[in-house]
Amino acid sequence: MRIDVFTIFPGLIDGFAAESLLGRAQEQGLLDVRAHDLRDHTDDRHHAVDDAPFGGGAGMVMTPDPIFRAVEAADPPRPLLLLGPGGRPFDQGMARELAAGSGFSLLCGRYEGIDQRVRDTLVDDEVSIGDYVLGGGEVAALVVIEAVGRLVPGVMGNDASAADESFADGLLEYPQYTRPARYRGLDVPDVLRSGDHGRVERWRRAQALARTIAARPDLIEARGGLSDADRTLLAEFALDERDQL
Ligand code: SAH
């Protein structure tokens, strides 16, 4: 999977993508993250990529020319997604969609944002990582790259992990425990050490349901509420949905 990133701080992208999961995936040829420096596509001595806004107002705006030229020179994989607080909210579903393709590209803004004509004619969509304002699109790009990259087949080592985690089934993940079985007087739930795999599975699902009801009732609503099977499962482990709500 090829991911191109357009930015004035390519080092931020390259540095992050060289480490850990993404670094290994790149070494294995599963991922190819390419950061393009917008300043390489300027002609003036200062490599300026910004200018004052028409109409006045605070701050600077990224000029269209370096962005158009950088994108044309790279001929990057599409969709080309602009990162911005006004974009489509990024979520696990979008991560899965992007992971199913062969690549995509990200455009990072800085300053007060970018010239509207880039938005109107060059990019395919705009993506936000949340309702807050960052200083630039690079951290948002890294969020997208990491969330998508780990879903690319082979990247995570154990592909089953992705099928089993938060949001996979519209629920948060069940609680996880590892050794020691008793830590500072705190015991791992007996069911996990019982060897009864069916019961472990049911317990995990019941816990995932209970957790989601408590922390993210909106996710339960999005699944169409609790089914009879869900209620039976909660009852089996004495988890009452009304206690959680
Ligand atoms: N003036 C703009 C914010 C500019 S912030 C506004 O009010 O909407 C500078 C850059 O940071 C943006 O161009 C964008 O690329 C990035 N950015 C800021 N917040 C973001 C968010 N929540 N999601 C994705 N990118 C964001």
Image: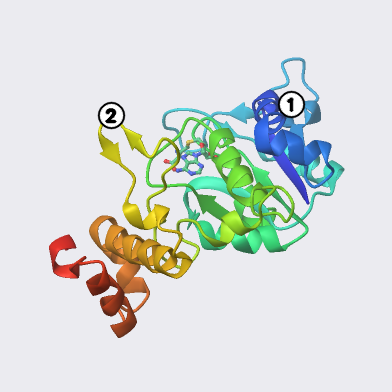
Helix, strand or loop at mark 2: loop
Which quadrant of the figure has residue 70?
Answer: top right
**Which one is in front in this view, the residue at disc 1 or the one at disc 2?**
2
Which quadrant of the figure has residue 96?
Answer: bottom right
Q: Along the polypeptide, which appears first: circle 1 or circle 2?
A: 1
Residue lying at the far left of the rendered structure: 243
Q: Amino acid at mark 2?
A: Arg
Residue 47's x, y, as percent?
73, 21
Image point (74%, 52%), residue name: 154
Image point (64%, 54%), residue name: 151
Alpha carbons under labels 1 and 2: distance apart: 55 Å
Depth order, front residue of 15/176 = 176
Q: Is residue 174 above or below residue 46?
A: below
Instruction: Identify residue for label 2.
Output: 184
Left or right, 144 with reference to 14:
left
Residue 55's x, y, as percent?
47, 38
Instruction: Identify residue for label 1.
Output: 39
Helix, strand or loop at mark 1: helix
Residue 231's x, y, as percent?
26, 77
Image point (53%, 63%), residue name: 93
Q: Amino acid at mark 1?
A: Arg
Q: Classify the position of the C terminus by image quarter.
A: bottom left
Depth order, front residue of 136/63 = 136
Q: Is residue 241 above or below residue 22?
A: below
Left or right, 24 with reference to 120:
right
Q: From this viewpoint, is residue 202 visible?
A: yes
Q: Residues within 10 Å of mark 1 (few under 14, many from 20)?
A: some
C-beta proximity under 8 Å, tags 1 and 2: no
Depth order, front residue of 173/19 = 173
Which mark, by number, is residue 240? none
Depth order, front residue of 45/131 = 131
